Image: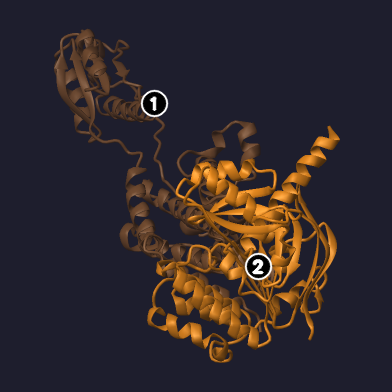
Chain colours: A orange, B brown
């Protein structure tokens, strides 16, 4: 397998703000690599560096085996990019947009039709409609078509499904799976944890730093402590009671349950909860649960925030 | 093969899809040319004259009828005193008061010097100036025609008289429209190309489409040229429409060479497009670009010599005006259209405009490279 993207120690500042701090990872050919992080984490900056739109302050990056600084013109021939904001011509029709992007890459819709066929079939009934008048899901499909029309080796998708309905999101990800089979490497950012689970590997990114890189099914291994789902009708009192316990590291509401994380050194959890049940919460029920990507992310996030504040405290 | 034709095709697709812009391109030249040319007419007719005739003689009546028959004045209001007439001036009902003194007829017959008083409402100083001019002319004619009677009766030797006969070159009937139309046409071409080009690159920035274009192999050169060519064509097209209208509606023929006119316009449009693009690269939103362009346009138009002669402006303003491309274009339009000037007469204009074109476009490209 070949390396499609390799990033080495990339840093980027905007004035005082450090958008990216020593980022480094590799994406293989035919891999879907997910970037998971909150707004302002630096995902878009990384995309813009890799798609040759801006230059990094430090570090090197290669896309399709080419240096992003020196060979930017060649890279542009060989990548597809879908910016976070819809960036096609709203006043041109579906077909005109597709045609325009095909022609500036010196290709035609026919030539790479097999790549976009599954998506384009859904767009075809609207091909005479101005792109600005499409629904959110259709817009994203058109944008994907335009990014694919020149058969790129690497595809960059910056939050492609934000603001798209669940059905369209599902279809969108099915398409990405197909593209992966064509050998296209895909770097995708998403705020949705369910989508993160569909990636081959994910990187959790926060404040310009990568917290963890792992396949989504392994990411819960880094979770520290044991996660227990707890339920009672008196939710608010329960949250207060759990947070007051010295054995509990954190407690958040999660749907109708509360997710309580018990510290790693706590051996027996049941006695603690039994005591609670007898004292205040007669209807208390609980079970152990597997931490999801969201739980891992929350934990990493609170850790890095705690680190930050302890560093600040030390400085004082 | 270059991507240039596809970019140009896309630009035209967008222009022809724009439901506001496209009609404007055709309607604006027609309306502005027709409306402005008539509105910018400096001829005043039917100026209201209030007459205060203290003499009430044949001579004074003759003088008054001389005013009314000139076609420029309406002498319908009569008053007994200047004070009464001034009330009308205050109300804005009258433009000028003509006061004929007592013994006007008697004094003329006895060859005594006589005076009439003209009080002109100068709220609109341009109108007042013209009214005063007209009145002088009327009085001159009256003096000539009604030489005091004694002169002929006593067979005295007539004093040698110098008579002026005036001929107006390049515009024999002194028609304001002939003078205005070429200038207005120049303004039209400038406004359309400057505004269109100044908001164009900004539009791609605002909508985010530039982000998508920048990751394609389109070079900056192709991008810029692809953006400017359609507006260049539109600018030339507007000149074509304007010249046709000038001929059909105002009967103005191009005395000089149309090829020369179009050639100059071509260089001019390239310069203006460069300026538009410079504005586009220095601003953030379409709104900002519009306001900045508007600022330039107002200064350019007021100093272009379109409405007011620029020979009389102060020296410092003249110094600024050297950098006003519209001034040169208005001059060339008038010279070639009305005077039939050839290339040798406007070669300096060509040189200056070529400099503008190179300067604006280089600045724009430099600034574009910096911001991207």
Q: Residue B106's x, y, as percent?
A: 21, 10
Whether residue B13 is visible here, answered yes or no, is: no
Chain bearing mark 2:
B
Neighbours of disc 2 within 10 Å: few (<14), some (14-19), many (20+) = some
Specify which label sits upstream in the sequence, 2 or 1: 1
Q: Residue B271's x, y, as percent?
A: 61, 57
Q: Nearer the viewer, mark 2 or mark 1?
A: 2
The answer to whether residue B158 is left or right of residue A308 is left
Residue at mark 2 to residue at mark 1: CA–CA distance: 57 Å
The answer to whether residue A223 is left or right of residue A90 is right
Asked if B35 appears above or below B19 in the picture, the reply is above
Determine the image quadrant of residue A107: bottom right
Q: Which residue is the site of mark 1?
A: B125
The answer to whether residue A152 is left or right of residue A235 is right
Chain bearing mark 1:
B
Q: Which residue is the site of mark 2?
A: B214
Q: Nearer the viewer, residue A102 or A83?
A: A83
- Dot 1: element: helix
């Amino acid at each position: 397998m070949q390396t499609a993207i390799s990033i080495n120690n990339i840093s980027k500042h905007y004035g005082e703000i450090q958008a990216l701090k020593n980022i480094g990872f590799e994406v293989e050919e035919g891999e879907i690599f997910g970037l998971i992080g909150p707004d302002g984490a630096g995902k878009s900056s990384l995309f813009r560096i890799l798609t040759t739109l801006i230059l990094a302050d430090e570090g090197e990056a290669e896309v399709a085996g080419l240096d992003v600084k020196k060979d930017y013109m060649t890279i542009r021939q060989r990548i597809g990019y879908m910016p976070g904001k819809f960036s096609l011509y709203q006043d041109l029709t579906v077909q005109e947009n597709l045609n325009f992007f095909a022609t500036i890459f010196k290709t035609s819709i026919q030539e790479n039709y097999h790549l976009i066929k599954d998506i384009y079939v859904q767009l075809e009934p609207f091909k005479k409609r101005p792109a600005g008048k499409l629904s959110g899901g259709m817009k994203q499909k058109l944008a994907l078509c335009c990014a694919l029309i020149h058969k790129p080796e690497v595809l960059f998708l910056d939050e492609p499904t934000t603001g798209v309905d669940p059905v369209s999101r599902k279809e969108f990800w099915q398409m990405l799976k197909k593209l992966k089979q064509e050998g296209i490497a895909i770097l995708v950012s998403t705020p949705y944890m369910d989508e993160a689970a569909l990636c081959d590997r994910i990187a959790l990114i926060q404040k310009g730093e990568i917290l963890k890189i792992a396949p989504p099914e392994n990411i819960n291994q880094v979770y520290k402590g044991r996660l227990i789902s707890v339920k009672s009708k008196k939710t608010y009192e329960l949250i207060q009671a759990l947070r007051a316990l010295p054995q509990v590291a954190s407690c958040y509401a999660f749907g109708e349950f509360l997710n309580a994380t018990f510290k790693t050194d706590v051996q027996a959890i049941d006695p603690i909860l039994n005591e609670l049940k007898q004292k205040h919460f007669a209807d208390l029920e609980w079970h152990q649960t597997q931490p999801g990507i969201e739980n891992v992310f929350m934990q990493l996030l609170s850790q890095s925030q705690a680190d930050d504040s302890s560093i600040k405290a030390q400085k004082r | 093969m270059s991507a240039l034709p596809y970019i140009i095709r896309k630009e035209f697709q967008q222009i022809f899809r724009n439901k506001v812009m496209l009609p404007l391109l055709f309607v604006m030249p027609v309306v502005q040319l027709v409306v402005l040319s008539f509105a910018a007419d400096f001829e005043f007719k039917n100026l209201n004259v209030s007459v205060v005739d203290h003499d009430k003689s044949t001579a004074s009546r003759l003088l008054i009828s001389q005013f009314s028959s000139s076609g420029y004045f309406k002498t319908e209001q009569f008053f007994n005193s200047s004070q009464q007439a001034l009330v009308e001036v205050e109300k804005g009902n009258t433009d000028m008061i003509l006061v004929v003194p007592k013994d006007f007829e008697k004094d003329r017959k006895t060859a005594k010097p006589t005076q009439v008083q003209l009080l002109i409402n100068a709220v609109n100083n341009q109108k007042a100036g013209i009214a005063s001019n007209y009145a002088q002319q009327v009085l001159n004619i009256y003096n000539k025609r009604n030489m005091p009677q004694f002169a002929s009766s006593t067979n005295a030797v007539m004093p040698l008289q110098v008579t002026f006969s005036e001929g107006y070159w390049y515009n024999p009937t002194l028609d304001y429209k002939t003078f205005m139309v070429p200038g207005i046409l120049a303004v039209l071409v400038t406004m359309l190309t400057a505004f269109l080009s100044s908001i164009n690159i900004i539009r791609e920035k605002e909508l985010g489409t530039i982000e998508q274009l920048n990751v394609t192999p389109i070079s900056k050169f192709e991008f810029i040229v692809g953006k400017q060519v359609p507006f260049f064509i539109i600018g030339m097209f507007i000149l074509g429409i304007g010249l046709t209208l000038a001929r059909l509606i105002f009967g103005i023929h191009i005395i000089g060479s149309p090829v020369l006119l179009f050639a100059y316009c071509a260089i001019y449009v390239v310069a203006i497009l460069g300026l538009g693009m410079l504005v586009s690269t220095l601003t953030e939103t379409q709104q900002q670009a519009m306001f900045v362009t508007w600022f330039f346009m107002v200064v350019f138009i007021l100093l272009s010599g379109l409405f007011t002669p620029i020979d009389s402006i102060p020296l410092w303003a003249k110094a600024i005006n050297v950098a006003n491309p519209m001034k040169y274009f208005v001059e060339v339009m008038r010279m070639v259209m009305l005077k039939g000037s050839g290339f040798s007469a406007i070669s300096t204009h060509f040189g200056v405009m070529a400099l503008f074109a190179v300067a604006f476009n280089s600045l724009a490209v430099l600034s574009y490279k910096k911001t991207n």
